[in-house]
Amino acid sequence: MSTTRSDSQSPSNWQISDSLPSHPEPYKIKMIEPIHLPDRKTREAALQEAGFNIFNIPSDHVFIDLLTDSGTGAMSEHQWASLMEGDESYAGSSSFFRFKNAVQDVMGFEYVLPTHQGRAAENVLHSVLVHDGDIVPGNSHFDTTKAHIEFRHAHAIDCTIDACFVPENDEPFKGNVDLAKLAKVVDEHGVEKIPFVLITVTNNSGGGQPVSLTNVKEVAAFCHERNLKLIIDAARFAENAWFIQQREPGQRERSVREIAKEVFSYADAATMSAKKDAIVNMGGMLCMRDEELFDQCSSFNILFEGYITYGGLSGRDMEALATGLYEGTEDDYLSARIGQVRRFGDSLTEAGIPIVRPPGGHAIYVDAKKFLPHLDQEQFPAQALVCELYLEGGIRGVEIGTVLADRDPDTGKNRPPKLELMRMTIPRRVYTENHLQYVRDVLVKLWERRDSIRGLKFTYEPPILRHFRARFEWE
Ligand SMILES: *Cc1c(COP(=O)(O)O)cnc(C)c1O
């Protein structure tokens, strides 16, 4: 692989040759949304009131919101215009057919059920496929996915390659599934216990790291030899395809859409949170090839979401989603977006701040174990860092660590994950380079006084998906 100028200047042992400098944003700003930095006193009061849980902070007390890239993107003028064309018919809405055509065209699936968001698609699919005692192997299941599996008394087993858990390891496809781990799980539990194998692209919980085309093919071959279904969690399929284009030998000349479609061609079905790569504020879908599975899922879609031609979405939502599927898979847009994330990450590395390398597609993950080595994982170092980032600069990040990992449903014990991270997620088409430089400057201040940062303890712990509603205080 060739080395670009920017790569050779990079401080770490940089191996990856994404084509930098990236494309500038292929759009300009037509409308702005004012934001303000609340003063220190207001921030202190807001954090206290929130029980040290940034999910409880009102957004007008947040200056730069890097909580999530989910539903926080800026829609284009075409998406806003397409809202006006929504057909709100209960059945057979023309907006549904436009949406379905876009899904067939971009993703290549014959059947699609609209859902109100990604987890709703999981709920519908898992209602058909996942049963008590089942095993669902995959590469770092997303938290809602895992919760839907465990809610049905089944188990999610993480088969991600070990490199994913080594933050300084600069491998290009750290999201990959380890085939040996997968084979071991299948041998141990038997195919009858495994309703499907799940590949999440990009690997969100593992740091927004991509999965290679080769890996998808290998996993698909493995599954299909054993008559196992392969399902893709497609929240960031376009970003994943862009990484394949940039990093995988022989893929440079192909478009992101071509690559994405090939990835999907190996899967039996896909769930997608359209709030990510389809750049809408709300929406999701469940896609599949098999008519029988579609029929079974349709019943649950009607039960949980809505009739099969709207399932939890307005006609106008399906219009914006259809438009967003095309915009979110354009090469120049993806180059600008992922380039922005990459430059932000590199600027932190240059300042000595430990992050997961290489930067992923949608977020930068600060390594809280290395940032705060004086804290034990049971003192929630990543959560403490999230609180300090807010206090210092009005910036909202999110914990991807021990709080999120929750307790083991069988033993009731905390299960501290290998990586203890603070995620700073970059919304699509929202913040400028200046905003991210400000975030870097705030983080540098925290880095300089890191020894003074204390741990947290629970004052309230909910029984399920605890990170959303838990409350804490300083130790
Ligand atoms: C966001 C996300 C989901 C869940 O989607 P929602 O729209 O938030 O319900 C599932 N998987 C992955 C990888 C995600 O990032």
Image (spheres, helix red, strand yellow):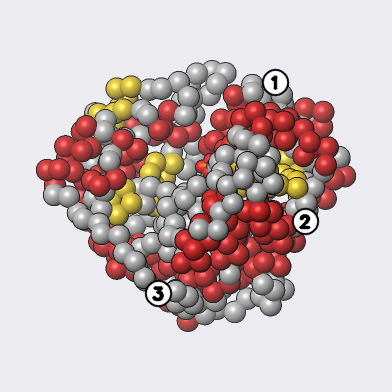
| Earlier sequence position, callout 1 versus callout 3 | 3
Q: Are marks 1 and 2 in contact (CB under 8 Å)?
A: no
Residue at horizontal 63 percent and vertical 41 percent from the top:
90
**Camera-nearest residue between 406 and 304:** 304
Task: Determine which of the numbered discs, if any, sits on residue 28 in the image.
Answer: 3
Mark 1: secondary structure: loop
The N terminus: image quadrant: bottom right
Residue at horizontal 31 percent and vertical 39 percent from the top:
54
| Image position of 19 (left or right of 397) | right
Identify the residue position indicated by label 2 in the image.
Answer: 265
Give ligand 1's quarter of the image: top right
Q: Within the image, what quadrant is residue 410 found in?
A: top right
Give the residue type at disc 3. Lys
| Earlier sequence position, callout 1 versus callout 2 | 1
Estimate the x, y position of residue 218 in percent, counting from the top left. 78, 53
Identify the residue position indicated by label 1 in the image.
Answer: 132
Residue 269 in view in this figure: yes
Mark 3: secondary structure: loop
Give the residue type at disc 1. Asp
